[in-house]
Image (spheres, rainbow, N blue to C red):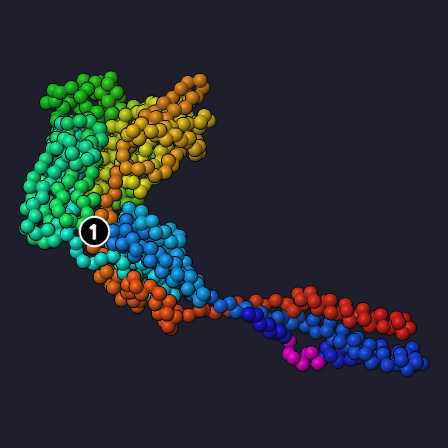
Amino acid sequence: METQIIIEQYPIWYLLGCLGLGIAAAALLYYKDRSFADSDTTTKRAILPLALLRCLTVAGIAALLLSPLIKRRQIDTVKPYILILQDNSESMRAGLTPNDTARFAADLRALSDNLSNDYQVATYNFGDKTDKGFDFSYRKKTTNLSASLDELYNTYANQNVGAIIIATDGIYNQGSNPLYSGEQAGIPIYSIALGDTTPKRDLLMDRVLYNRIAYLGDKFTIRPEISARNCKGETTAINVFKGKTASGNKLFGKAVNIATNDFTQGEDVILNADAVGLQTYTIQVAPISNELTDRNNTQTIYVEVIDSRQKVLLLAHSPHPDIAAIKQAIEANRNYQITTSFANTFNGSLRDYDVVVLHGIPAMGANTESILSQLKTNNTPTWFILSAQTDPNALGKAQELLQISGGNPNNTNDSKPLFSSQNFNIFTLDSKVGRAVQEFPPLVTPFGKYQTKANAQVLMKQKIGTVPTDYALWAFSAPGSSKQAVTAGEGLWRWRLYDFRADQSYETFNELVSKTIQYLAVKNDKRKFKVNLPKTIFNENEQITLDAELYNDSYELVNEPEVNINIYDEGGKAYPFVFNRSSNAYTLNAGFFPVGSYTFQAGTVFNGQEFKANGTFTVAAIQLESMQTTANHRLLYALSGKTGGEVLGLDSIGAIANRLKNKESIKPIQYSTFKTEPFINLKWLFGLLIALLTIEWFVRKYIGGY
């Protein structure tokens, strides 16, 4: 609906002046002009209408010169939104009979059609994510109700949402508690409570606690935890099998007597990591008679057995608290095995270690030339940590990152860390790590003039007192050169203590040390063709994504040739794909795959040379929806009660429409839009004025007035 108002910028009596001007113009033309005095009667009769036309034309033009405005008001009526959210997870199938499933789908569609007459209706289904429209296939593997509600609140923020209708059994197994979603949204939630709240007789493998990585030759522990409902007096067993099924190679078995109707028990099982690669184990709680389902009696886990830890040698000139701090930080990462020793007592072979950390070495007056020579000959990745005893001249020869000159052994500086992110691209640190480290106490650094060499990348510079300097405090060799790192000061133990005092953890300090060791320990991969996966174990509701890289002879990324890949399932069936080009590399989204183990072989031809890459990955089953079989209507009552809605059953879906129509707060909203523009912009006014002048001219011409 639109209304218009004319606004004058001058007093209204100015219009009388415009009218007077029109009358004067008409009188001057038709009553003062003697050419009409001797006209016949018919002509004289036309004079008055012609004078009126001239009066209106002149008055109208004069009025437009006063620049009047026209104000338009547009009123739009917006119906409220009703959002219908339908649970599409697997637990719904278990809670509805086939007849109830068909009736529920028909009733929910009918409700949507009925509400569409008075409201704007948007329908969604949810599980692990939210999709538009209804879907009654009940295939989604997880339920994240809070994320779905948050998505609706964000999508329809600041819009007229009258109510949200949720059709669900109230079971969720991902995300936060839905009660805390959109607390301030003020939208009533009407819940359609589905499923059965009566606890059924059921025995299930509740969860299995385990580490995903083990090391060849080690023993590792898994902890199956079982639950039993309404099974008092029964006897079952916890069994562990090697492989994907509850048969074959049985590694562990123990009988369990169920003493109560609400029973839980866990059991620690110690297994041997006796084979390299991804190992599959099936953990089962033996089924009993008349239980609701045996689909939740087993879980399959995957443990990656690594051939060996990378070995790190921490070699020090003399006892120092830094040694313990560094050792504990490295041990926090189970991928590393650390050995500590002093240079004057070390009698092992440096070839046995992947990374060597030198604290205070080379030191003044100490004979460490043999150690430094072996490290250089073997091209062993080395981390130099300076101390007050460090010999600057020997240090300059031992590494290729930092040169210190003009020093005095008796003088030191207290240097605080100052992050230097510019041109540093060796690895990334969390932003909170960068902020936290700059609050750490200073390190004791040797006095002298520091010169950073061309192949060094500086992570931190020294801030001496309040003066920032260009002196390197923590530096790394650039990729492609010998792996080296230099920390130009001692006192790292203070950093570790400060980190714990500030955050009640050693996380920041450990990450800094771990990233340093990780960079040094990673072997340079000189392959010209690589295929990478973000991980080796995917859940069945995750899409399989792969990236590929192809290098020319100068080790520059290229993506000119086409890259093909075949993914093979356990039966040997091939799934062929072609990688997409992305920037100067390749990427592929292969979509969803069934549960199982897969191998792949990718290949391409470049400059007449054939390149191939192989790998494996596993798709693991998700059993969360079978872990809880009892509907949670208490959640729905709490959610609807908190938001001012109601809870209705399957038989009352049709009544929701009347409940919404009777709710006073769910009403259309009218929006008014105002627009002001000059009256002279109306094109029809010019047409009217031209028409008046044309009529006057034509009549006067006809009666001989010209």
User: Which residue has dot 1 on it?
Assistant: 628
85 displayed left or right of 580: left
Which of the 4 image quadrants contains residue 635? bottom left
**Within the magenta stretch, is there residue 15?**
yes
Q: Nearer the viewer, residue 315 or 630?
A: 630
Q: From the viewer's perspective, tell me whether residue 701 is left or right of residue 222.
A: right
The x and y percentages for residue 352 are 18, 21
**Whether residue 229 is situated above or below residue 527 in the rendered picture:** below
**Which region shows up in magenta?**
10-16
Q: Is 683 or 162 nearer to us in this picture?
A: 162
Task: Using the rendered image of the protein, determine whether residue 201 is visible from the camera's viewpoint.
Answer: yes
Q: Nearer the viewer, residue 236 or 3?
A: 236
Q: Quadrant of residue 401?
A: top left
Q: Is residue 452 visible?
A: no
Q: Position of residue 553 (x, y in %)?
A: 41, 20
Q: Quadrant of the N terminus?
A: bottom right
> Residue 679 at x, y = what percent?
65, 69
